[in-house]
Amino acid sequence: MFLLAGCASPNWPGLQDNTALGERQVNTTEWQGRLSLRIQSEPATSMSAGFLLRGEASHGRLDFYSPLGTTLASLRWAPHDVQLQQGGQLQRFNSLDELTEQATGATLPVSALFDWLNGVPSLSPGWQADLSQLPQGLLLAQRVSPTPAVQLRIKLD
């Protein structure tokens, strides 16, 4: 897991990049802001970073940024291609769950996340989302099972 400190939202390098995954362009929908994740493990771990999320649950890209706008990691997925680009290294994974766990320390409900960001109260096993503050750009979600508990906080720009 990589730990990220700080949050920022400058004009991200590559924002206009229309990276193709498979045969489909990932540039339809996007969100950017700050993401923080707290994992209630022993010891507790956390990460925080600027982010840019593009695409949809089946084809997408999630980039994490430092406070200065440097790309810390880029997660990309399509039906037959799931990868993490970090520090000049490219890793491939069998599933989006494996990818998000490697990148953040916790398996994230990516499909539900897209719904939640669109204001749809989608269910994801073990997760509870609070969409009540979404009009103010804040999404809160927590995983209650399996353990360890995970708290996800997204502040949209």
Image: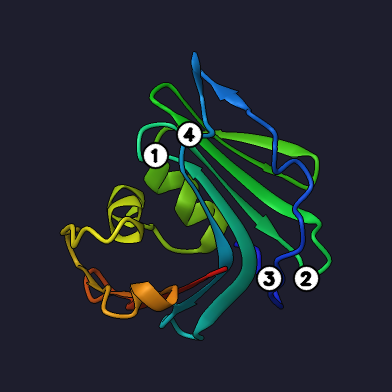
Residue at image location 29% in from the left, 60% down from the top: 116
Q: Nearer the viewer, residue 39 or 58?
A: 58
Q: Residues within 10 Å of mark 1 (few under 14, many from 20)?
A: many
Q: Secondary structure at mark 1?
A: loop
Residue 135 seen: yes
Could you tell me residue 17's position as x and y percent?
Answer: 69, 33
What mark, if any, has residue 56 been given in the picture?
A: 1
Q: CA distance from mark 4 to mark 1?
A: 10 Å
Q: Quadrant of the C terminus?
A: bottom right
Q: Nearer the viewer, residue 39 or 32?
A: 32
Answer with the quarter of the image where residue 19 lies: top right
Q: CA distance from mark 4 to mark 3?
A: 22 Å
- Foreground label between 4 and 1: 1
Q: Which residue is mark 4?
A: 77
Q: Secondary structure at mark 3?
A: loop
Q: Residue furthest front?
A: 135
Q: Which residue is mark 3?
A: 4
Q: Are the two marked residues, 2 and 1, in contact with CB atoms closer than 8 angstroms?
A: no
In this rendering, would 90 be left or right of 155?
right
Q: Residues within 10 Å of mark 4 (few under 14, many from 20)?
A: many
Q: Which residue is mark 2?
A: 67
Could you tell me residue 66's position as x and y percent?
Answer: 76, 65
Q: Nearer the viewer, residue 4 or 69?
A: 69
Residue at image location 78% in from the left, 70% down from the top: 67
Question: Could you tell me the amino acid type at mark 2?
Answer: Pro
In this rendering, would 78 be left or right of 11?
left
Question: Could you tell me the amino acid type at mark 3?
Answer: Leu
| 4 up-or-down from 57: above or below | below
Q: CA distance from mark 1 to mark 3?
A: 24 Å
**Mark 2 vs mark 3: which is more N-terminal?**
3
Question: Could you tell me the amino acid type at mark 1?
Answer: Glu
